[in-house]
Image (cartoon, rainbow, N blue to C red):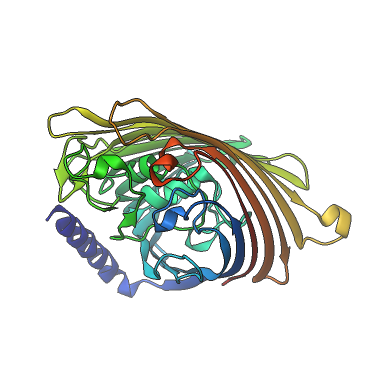
Amino acid sequence: MINTGIKYLHFTLLVACLTPQAAIAAEYNAHGILDFRVKHINSSDQGYLTGGQGKLGLGDGVHFSAAQIGADLSVSWDNGLSAHGVFNAYPEATGDGEKSALGLTEIYLKYRSLPNSAGYRIQTKAGLFYPEISLENNAYAWASKDTLDSSTLNTWIGEEIRVVGTEIKVTRLGRINNDKYDLSFSATAFVNNDPAGALLAWHGWAISNRQTLWNEQRTFPWFPAREEGKNLAGQAHKSDPFLELDSRVGYHTRGEWKLRGKGSISAGYYDNRAIPYKVVDGQYGWRTRFYHLGTRWRLSDNLSLTAQYLSGDTLMQSKAKEDVVNNDYASGFVALHYNWHALVANKKHKSTLRVEDFSVTDNDKTEGDDNNEDGQALTLNHSYRLNKQWFLSAEFTVIDSHRPARAYTGQPVDSVETQWQFATRYFL
């Protein structure tokens, strides 16, 4: 009932806001991505997208797929108002791929004012959207320009973190104040993200480009605590991360310092404020909180850096308010991007090296549900721009992880998985 009311409220808001704009000049834009890939994966376990403990989306073998078909649509008016809708499709890959999926990932209204005489600009956003966390997913439909798959940190954001809410952002523009830097601060109030944390607990950190669609349920591995009579017997077989279970409003805040021509440094905090012992139809509230830090920095004409770190905790309890899942978690990466135009006399070649470290610490005593894990990952990507819209990419990823829960299904606790990908991508 709560979800239905929220969706109806935002649909009504969308219609109400768009109708008066008919007399104002509008500009329509349609962008998107077509991403075709062949993958070779070496893994002893099933991919996490189909309920395995593997750290990659798919399992062992060769896979052909349209890894993403995304549409990023918008209409903007002269008064600063714009409307945005993002849709994604993930056709079933060959081999052990999950079933095809098509749906909505974001839909929101945005208003951006002109700066006032003191150099302050206000931006507001309302609807379904990603909180401003990822520094990687900077292309249309939340794809990445630099790598084919996101880091473990942003793979999780794409899987479990999405909000229905309102964001207000204030930016102080340096150029109006004779400064070389801009300062901004944003605050978001939201609902519909109460089960976030379940998938991170039960399959751990992972690497892929897959985003969870609105109203989509995601599978997770079997473990003994789900058996009849055990602590998690009442848990639904799939997790639905974008639900509102307790009518409590969560929040996200973020600040950013941006130096003109060099880069930016940002920090933020997320708290869904979910009641951890609330359960509706097998979906539990998870009190999930984390802070995140990030920077994008231009080191030279050819070399730039992207780095992010996220750390937090999540809690899920029984109806008797006893801890069932109580985890701390952290993930961070550093990526270097090199443009080869100084050596090959054109701007068509770009390489990225990304290294990561991730962990989950299980603080509860629930038998048959060990969420501990730690690991490292390395990704190498090289992309070649055929023209303005077509890109060829080759990417190698290796993930070394320790996860005791693999023993529940007879898999090695320690695992090294590798993935080669070759992609043709078209950006509209």
Please indicate, yes or no, whether residue 272 appears anywhere in the rendered image: yes
- Between 362 and 252, the one lying in front of the other is 362
Determine the residue positioned at 68% across, 70% down.
388
Asked if residue 269 lies left or right of residue 325, the reply is right
Residue nearer the viewer, 96 or 395: 96
Which quadrant does the N terminus fall into? Answer: bottom left
Label tally? 0
| Image quadrant where residue 276 sits | top left
Q: Residue at x 71, y 72 (%)?
A: 387
Residue drawn at x 44%, y 46% is: 156
Q: Is residue 73 visible?
A: no
Residue 322 lies, with reference to residue 164, above or below; the image says above
On the image, the x and y values in percent for residue 227 come to: 23, 44
Q: Quadrant of residue 273?
A: top left
Task: Indicate whether 326 appears above or below 395.
Answer: above
Image coords of residue 352 (percent x, y): 69, 49
Question: Residue, x 26% and y 71% (percent of image)?
Answer: 19
Question: In this rendering, is residue 48 above or below 30?
Answer: above
Q: Picture quarter containing residue 407?
A: top left
Q: Position of residue 61 (x, y in %)?
A: 58, 63
Where is residue 283? Give x, y as percent. Answer: 21, 47
Instruction: Please give left or right for residue 328 compared with residue 306 in the image.
Output: left
Q: Please identify the quadrant where the C terminus is shown.
A: bottom right
